[in-house]
Image (cartoon, grey):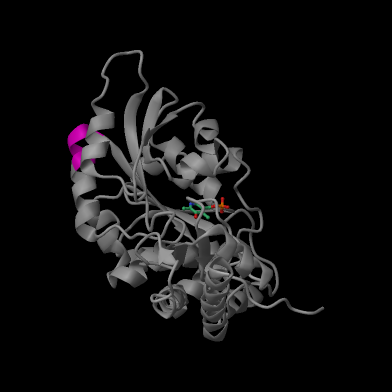
Amino acid sequence: MTHEPQQFASDNYAGICPEAWAAMEVSNVGHAPAYGEDEWTQRAADAFRTLFESECEVFFAFNGTAANSLALAALGQSYHSVICSSSAHVETDECGAPEFFSNGSKLLVASSADGKLTPQAIRALATSRSDIHFPKPRAVTITQPTETGQVYSIEEIQAISATCRALGLKLHMDGARFAQACAHLGCGPADITWRAGVDVLCFGGTKNGMAVGEAILFFDPKLAEDFDYRCKQAGQLASKMRFLAAPWVGMLESGAWLRNAEHANGCAARLAAAIADVPQVAPMFPVEANAVFLSAPAPLLDDLRARGWRFYTFIGGGARFMFAWDADPARVDALAADIRAAAQATQMSEAA
Ligand SMILES: *Cc1c(COP(=O)(O)O)cnc(C)c1O
């Protein structure tokens, strides 16, 4: 089979990183108890507790949609509501799963220019109504980093959690790219989660070099009550759990989770720097994690596609480039060169 040249349309185009793969291979020797009663699952959960310096409760799900939906469902009743940003994955990309798994909890959407929620926006939504006809606000979900690659600072998260506590709201973090946020901030995972007031985190493995799998961490054990039943009912209890857990052992114990994210972020910064002076092309958002969104005239983007590059334009019509753990710097440079060439070509055809 021939391999296609690397594309940056999605960080999910990448394969499995060596550390995750090696751990799966080791775990593939012999038999092990099923449904999470095995040593790999215990070891992965312990690795999370060590990394987060917390006696958190740890669960494993197959993907982020399930992890987010089930975590949010655990925070309230069906008549409760969850505050999120207008560009939140739970609102735009989960096909109603958060509402489905919570038996109808409504998402209350705060419009947000940069995808971040603010204490003001949360307070405005949470206090807009207090009568019985409105679904009672119970939780807030923030995405770290946001869908467009912005990272909440420690102070921003602290301010949000203080507002949540004042209003009696639980705080959930969608960390599909949580490692990339840690890499950007250079802080410990605890600093932007429980120490900053986050109650539950969905920590993404898939976009950080695993084949499949997200971890759900409850920093308040009371919130995790019966969560194992919730996972099972939703079809998220892996019978051969060791194969969801072992790659986490490989990622966490080796430090690959952070190295992978640093590399991915570095490639995004590399592209942004390489095209900073190209006319007609401008970053739509600050490049802080592993994403670069570029606004450019449609003919330029067509030209770039004709040069063989794949990318999505579902956010504001800009071109999205996502960098994975194995992004090849030479391919990043080739993309930058083609963006420059496409800009020149479209400028010349405009002048003609
Ligand atoms: C990718 C992603 C998820 C998880 O998506 P799945 O396809 O369900 O694994 C969740 N949140 C954000 C912000 C994402 O980018």
Query: Most prominent secondary structure in the magenta stretch?
Result: helix
Q: Position of residue 104 (x, y in %)?
A: 49, 26
Q: Write down the quadrant of residue 273 in the picture.
A: bottom left
Relative height, residue 35 to residue 10 (above, below)? above
Residue extending farthest right: 1
Identify the residue at horizontal 60%, vertical 61% (top origin): 212
Q: Quadrant of residue 23?
A: bottom right
Instruction: Give the residue drawn at x 49%, y 73%.
Output: 251
Residue 248 rendering spot, x and y as whole percentages: 51, 68
User: Can residue 52 be spotted in the picture?
Assistant: yes
- Work out whether residue 126 or residue 309 is closer to the camera in this orientation and state it: 309
Q: Is residue 38 visible?
A: no
Q: Read off the magenta span.
A: 163-168
Where's the N terminus, which quadrant?
Answer: bottom right
Q: Is residue 164 magenta?
A: yes
> Where is 256 relative to 239, above or below?
below
Q: Which residue extends farthest bottom? A: 330
User: Does 113 sit left or right of 206 as displayed?
Assistant: left
Residue at the top extreme, as displayed: 132
Magenta run includes residue 333: no
Which quarter of the rendered picture does the C terminus lie within?
Answer: bottom right
Q: Image point 38% across, 58% down: which residue?
A: 145
Q: Which one is in front, 182 or 199?
A: 182
